[in-house]
Amino acid sequence: MEKSLQGKRVAMLLTDGVEQAEYEGPRAFLEEHGARVDLVSPKKPGERIQAFNHLTPGAQFPVDKAVSEARPEEYDALVLPGGVANPDQLRLSPESVGFVSRYAQTGRPLAAICHGPWLLINAGLMSGRHVTSWPSLETDIRNAGGRWSDEPVVIDGRFITSRKPEDIPAFNARLEDALREPTAVGV
């Protein structure tokens, strides 16, 4: 397989309650294509994140880097997986919201799936954006000044959003495009 993302670094910001498929699917895809992926979290390195498969506890994953120590400029992309509990907890973490806000200032790809766009709202990044998400976020997105549509993937400048685990192949493809060709998704 061609390592089209060789030399790229990607942060995946998550905590307990992450939807397992929305973490594992993109991470495996990125690593298979040569990217180095860090699990960034409010938890400390070596602590474990409890993933879920909908409402059923799933696997646990070790934290690579604490969000308080992560530097946005070190990463070529930021991915925000969903699940309900994961982004709901992260948006109450000032370090996590601050990291997302500072990362957005780099102008590099920022990808969110399912309930992940909640972090975009709390980071003050939704106004004027066109995004998709899990359908229950539609009102939150509109109230934050965004435009929501029900599509597998929506690209708005450097923002890539998706709805649910079934959309992961399309989500991954657009993320790869953005990392391979920085102008592929616009600026």
Image: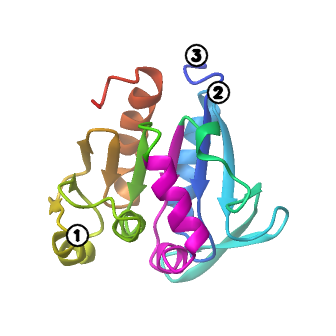
Residue 86 part of the magenta-drawn span: yes
Q: Position of residue 161 (x, y in %)?
A: 32, 52
**Local crowd size for mark 2, using a 10 Å CA cut-off: few (<14), some (14–19), many (≥20):** some
Q: Is residue 129 magenta?
A: no
Q: Please determine whether, in this image, residue 36 is positioned above or below residue 39.
A: above
| Discs 3/2, front | 2
- Residue 18: x and y in percent read 55, 70
Q: On the picture, is 15 further left or further right than 159? A: right
Q: Provide the secondary structure element on which disc 2 rests.
A: loop
- The three-letter code of the residue at mark 1 reads Ile
Q: Are marks 2 and 1 in contact (CB under 8 Å)?
A: no
* Observer-nearest of 73 and 109: 73
Quarter where residue 96 is shown: bottom right
Residue in the image at 58% along x and 53% along y? 12
**Secondary element type, mark 3:** loop
Q: Amino acid at mark 2?
A: Gly
Please report contact status of discs 1 and 3: CB closer than 8 Å, yes or no: no
Residue under circle 3?
Answer: 2
